[in-house]
Amino acid sequence: MKNILTSSTLGSQVLFVISILMTVFGIYTYGFGLTELSLVILGYFMYGSLGVVVTYHRHLTHNSYKTHPLITKIFSILGALGGTGSTIAWVAIHINHHLKSDKPTDPHSPKYNGFKIFNLDYEEGISSDTKWRMRHLVTDKFHQFLHRYYFGIIAVWFTVLCLIGGLPLAIWLHLTASVVTVFMSNLVNYIGHKPNMLGGYRRYNLNDDSTNNWLWSIASWGETWHNNHHRHPKSFSCGEKWWEVDISAYIIRLIKTN
């Protein structure tokens, strides 16, 4: 039987619903102004950009750059706090996505799955090829710990924020920010494979529906230059033209060691 603290689809779905309800409670009880918005954006930057995009995606999945191991660990924790699953679960799903892009077995192709919020049970149907590609994670004790005690780590962080600034800080900096992180992470999976969406265009004619989208590039920290990314998955920068703003790539330039 799986540990209740282990990263899972059901657990993440429950946490997502709780986070939405607490956000509504926070708005009703405390109001929502510029300070609260700033905390949400800060949290989304920490979890979404530093955690999911910079580390989960471009570093741990595609190994597009090297950085100090301590930075990897800190940013991996930030990614875990965002509610999109552990490093092991997230990387496994994304590797499968690239191996089977827009095929029936693609874990999050809008062609077959629509707008699907969660798919984090990486053990189900994971191929031997995927296991080999992510062996650096599944054999690492730190990432094993993040996966096994995923929800416990989130609970500790929530408690710390409550002790520092009370429930409002925990709601805006964590719960609401995680709602935005989860929603935007899945939105990228959707609009990044919808060529006909407003703002969409394809630079490369690939054997999938991967699509760039300028409209969401800043809000997604540069992830919607998706057609570029599928053509050059090993590049730490998804933006290829000067006007293709990729905030996460700018951050990587500051922390990379190669």
Image: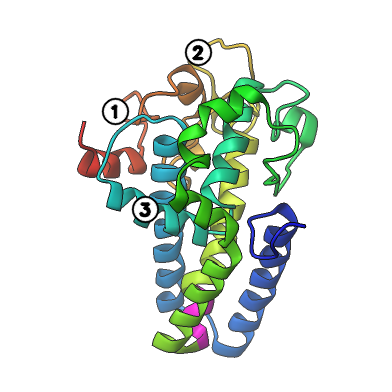
Depicted 83 relative to depicted 229: above or below: below
User: Which of the pair 48/142 is nearer the observer?
Assistant: 142
C-beta proximity under 8 Å, tags 3 and 1: no
Residue 166 pos. (x, y %): 47, 89
Dot 1, crowdedness within 10 Å: few (<14), some or many (≥20)?
few
Q: Is residue 10 magenta?
A: no
Depicted 235 relative to depicted 45: above or below: above
Q: Of circles 2 and 1, which is in front?
A: 2
Dot 3, crowdedness within 10 Å: few (<14), some or many (≥20)?
some
Residue 16 pos. (x, y %): 67, 63
Image quadrant where one finds the N terminus: bottom right
Residue 227 pos. (x, y %): 51, 23
**Which label is found at residue 204?**
2
Residue at image point 59% right, 30% down: 131
The tag earlier along the polypeptide, 3 or 2, is 3
**Residue type indicated by callout 1:** Trp
**Which label is found at residue 242?**
1
Residue at image point 55% right, 10% down: 205
Depicted 6 relative to depicted 255: above or below: below
**Residue type indicated by callout 3:** Lys
**Residue type indicated by callout 2:** Tyr
The tag earlier along the polypeptide, 3 or 1, is 3
Q: Which residues are magenta?
A: 167-172
User: Which of the pair 255/177 is nearer the observer?
Assistant: 255
Q: Of circles 3 and 1, which is in front?
A: 3
Provide the major secondary structure of the magenta segment: helix
Residue 213 pos. (x, y %): 52, 32
C-beta proximity under 8 Å, tags 3 and 2: no
The tag earlier along the polypeptide, 2 or 1, is 2
Give the tally of numbered discs. 3
How did the renderer colour the structure? rainbow
What residue is shown with label 3? Answer: 73
